């Protein structure tokens, strides 16, 4: 059956929102967006440029004093209204999420629900931003700590889950009284155009959230801009290095949520079916393009081969195809270039001695115009090989055996990255023992993504970044600290 064609009529048109002005394009180059399901163009618009960033920052700065001064209960009410409106408009948002980057349509309602919950969770904090008093040393004094917004925060997000990533930043940033300049990725712009529309409809004052849709130059202009107090960046380590180099000039603080090569530890005492199903989700979730997907499977030797065969059998039942079809479980990767890069990494893994268990070849036939790779499982992967160490960002799992708990922990931690870790075991003692030794920001025991709720801190260690989005830790990400000391002695 032919793939469904994206309906261009549902796409939002305003790629630039500056204060109360909504514009259909910026001052930058013309850009044609491509739908990864069929490689068809969905529309063209002019990207933002540095001048547009200037205007967006000016609008945010103009809105900042009143937004910061707005009582917390008012900010809370606005955020609750936004959450309700996002839920109300989920059916409008869903196709945009698929069209912009090939996400499966089945996931759309969950993405809207997740976005709404973030505004609800952090809206609940907006009226509870409190300082603390300090018991002082020395003479009589009163000392207290205040938590202040940065003023204007620049938020830069990637294409793989723009709504997820942007709301992870926007909700705590707004709750703590910051205004935002948000950069939508040019190759997946539609969900954020829609979100900013909904934010205005919810009654947020103009300038509190501004949108610039553009590429690396627009992000770079934001990082360099003196009017932005902090950058929150979600993306790759390579870009993070450039951002940090630029931020060195302005001494701007930068929050980093970066990539991963998250380990999945499967012990012989695990529920094998559940561990295989969850293991497979590392290839399937976000079409294999999720930062925290568990893609490096470490399996105890006693169950190694049955587990590998179970993965392959389950992979055969996953429907890969039309992102807009309701029965599709996995869609395409983002682009032709990404597909070629992923295939090159798989070939490199095979050349390094890995065994191809399933997948590996681009899908042809009705899939041919789009960017489709089936679930690809490589077994017997040497821990030092490039495919075991580098983020693939596609539906590729690498599997390596281990012989002891100590070896499993050592292998899991032997990575530049430290975003997620997944432990499969039925031993309570082992679960906690191993979890406590994972060099990763988020450890899940017998899970594969359920922990990704707004109430828990999310972020990485090592090359996966620093800072936390989610949970009360995210509030601190968007606040600076002021200490006030008052002399209680006269004269
Ligand atoms: P990327 O680093 O290429 O781009 C991310 C964003 O940065 C884009 O909006 C891009 O336009 C912008 N950008 C590029 N160069 C810039 C510069 N010099 N200055 C400022 N901004 C610039 O990453 P990507 O390919 O879009 O996304 C994939 C990466 O993101 C993966 O590594 C993935 O693991 C990571 N990611 C991390 C998380 C997380 O929460 N930890 C979430 C999603 C994705």
Image (spheres, grey):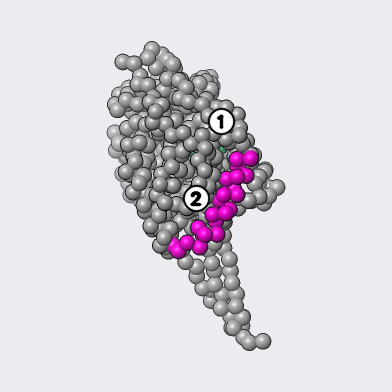
Which of the 4 quarters of the picture holds residue 73? bottom left
Query: Main structural element of the magenta stretch: helix, strand or loop?
Result: helix
Of residues 419 and 144, the one drawn nearer to the viewer in this rendering: 144
Q: Residue at x 44, y 47 (%)?
A: 200
Secondary structure of the residue carrying tag 1 is strand
Which disc is residue 206 wearing? 2
Position of 30 relative to 250 (above/below):
above
Does the residue tagged 2 have its C-beta within 8 Å of any atom of ligand 1? Answer: no
Q: Marks 2 and 1, Cα distance to the nearest angstrom?
A: 22 Å
* Residue 220 image offset from top left, x and y in percent: 63, 40
Q: Earlier in the sequence, mark 2 or mark 1?
A: 1
* Residue 134 image offset from top left, x and y in percent: 53, 73
Name the residue beneath numbered marker 1: 46
Which disc is residue 284 wearing? none
Determine if the magenta segment contains residue 324: no
Few, some or many C-alpha atoms within 10 Å of disc 1 (few <14, some 14-19, many ≥20)? some
Q: Residue at x 40, y 58 (%)?
A: 76
Determine if the magenta segment contains residue 59: yes
Of residues 409 and 89, the one drawn nearer to the viewer in this rendering: 89
The quarter of the picture where the N terminus appears is top left
The magenta stretch is 51-72
Q: Residue furthest bottom?
A: 490
Secondary structure of the residue carrying tag 2 is loop
The quarter of the picture where the C terminus appears is bottom right
Q: Residue furthest top?
A: 365
Position of 446 relative to 343 (above/below):
below
């Amino acid at each position: 059956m032919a793939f469904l064609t994206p309906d261009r009529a549902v796409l939002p048109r305003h790629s630039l929102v500056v204060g109360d002005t909504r514009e259909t394009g910026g001052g930058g180059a013309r850009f044609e967006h491509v739908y990864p399901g069929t490689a068809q163009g969905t529309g063209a618009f002019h990207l933002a440029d540095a001048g547009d960033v200037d205007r967006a920052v000016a609008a945010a700065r103009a809105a900042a004093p009143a937004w910061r001064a707005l009582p917390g209960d008012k900010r809370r009410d606005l955020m609750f209204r936004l959450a309700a409106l996002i839920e109300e408009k989920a059916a409008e948002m869903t196709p945009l999420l698929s069209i912009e980057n090939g996400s499966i349509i089945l996931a759309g309602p969950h993405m809207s629900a997740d976005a709404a919950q973030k505004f609800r969770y952090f809206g609940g904090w907006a009226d509870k931003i409190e300082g603390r008093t300090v018991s002082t040393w020395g003479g009589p004094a009163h000392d207290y700590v205040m938590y202040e917004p940065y003023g204007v925060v620049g938020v830069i997000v990637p294409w793989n889950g723009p709504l997820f990533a942007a709301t992870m930043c926007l909700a705590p940033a707004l709750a703590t009284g910051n205004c935002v300049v948000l950069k939508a990725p040019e190759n997946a712009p539609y969900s954020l155009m829609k979100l900013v529309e909904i934010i205005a409809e919810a009654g947020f004052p103009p300038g509190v959230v501004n949108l610039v849709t553009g590429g690396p130059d627009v992000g770079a202009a934001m990082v360099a801009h003196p009017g932005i107090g902090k950058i929150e960046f979600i993306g790759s380590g390579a870009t993070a290095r450039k951002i940090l180099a630029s931020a060195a000039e302005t001494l701007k603080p930068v929050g980093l949520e970066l990539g991963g090569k998250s380990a999945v530890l499967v012990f012989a005492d695990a529920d094998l079916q559940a561990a295989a199903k969850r293991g497979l989700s590392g290839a399937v979730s976000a079409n294999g393009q999720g930062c925290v997907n568990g893609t490096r499977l470490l399996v105890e030797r006693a169950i190694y081969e049955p587990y590998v065969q179970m993965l392959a059998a389950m992979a055969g039942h996953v429907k890969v195809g039309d992102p807009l079809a309701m029965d599709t479980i996995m869609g395409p990767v983002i682009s032709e270039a990404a597909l070629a890069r992923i295939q090159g990494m798989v070939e490199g893994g095979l050349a390094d001695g890995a065994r191809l268990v399933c997948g590996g070849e681009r899908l042809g036939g009705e899939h041919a115009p789009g960017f489709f790779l089936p679930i690809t499982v490589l077994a017997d992967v040497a821990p030092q090989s490039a495919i075991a160490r580098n983020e693939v960002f596609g539906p590729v799992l690498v599997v390596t055996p281990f012989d002891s708990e100590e070896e499993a922990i050592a292998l899991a931690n032997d990575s530049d990255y430290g975003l997620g870790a997944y432990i499969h075991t039925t031993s309570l003692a082992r679960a906690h023992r191993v979890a406590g030794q994972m060099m990763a920001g988020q450890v899940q025991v017998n899970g594969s993504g359920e922990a990704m709720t707004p109430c828990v801190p999310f972020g990485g260690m090592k090359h996966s970044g620093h800072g936390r989005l989610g949970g009360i830790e995210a509030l601190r990400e968007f606040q600076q600290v002021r200490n006030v000391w008052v002399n209680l002695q006269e004269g």
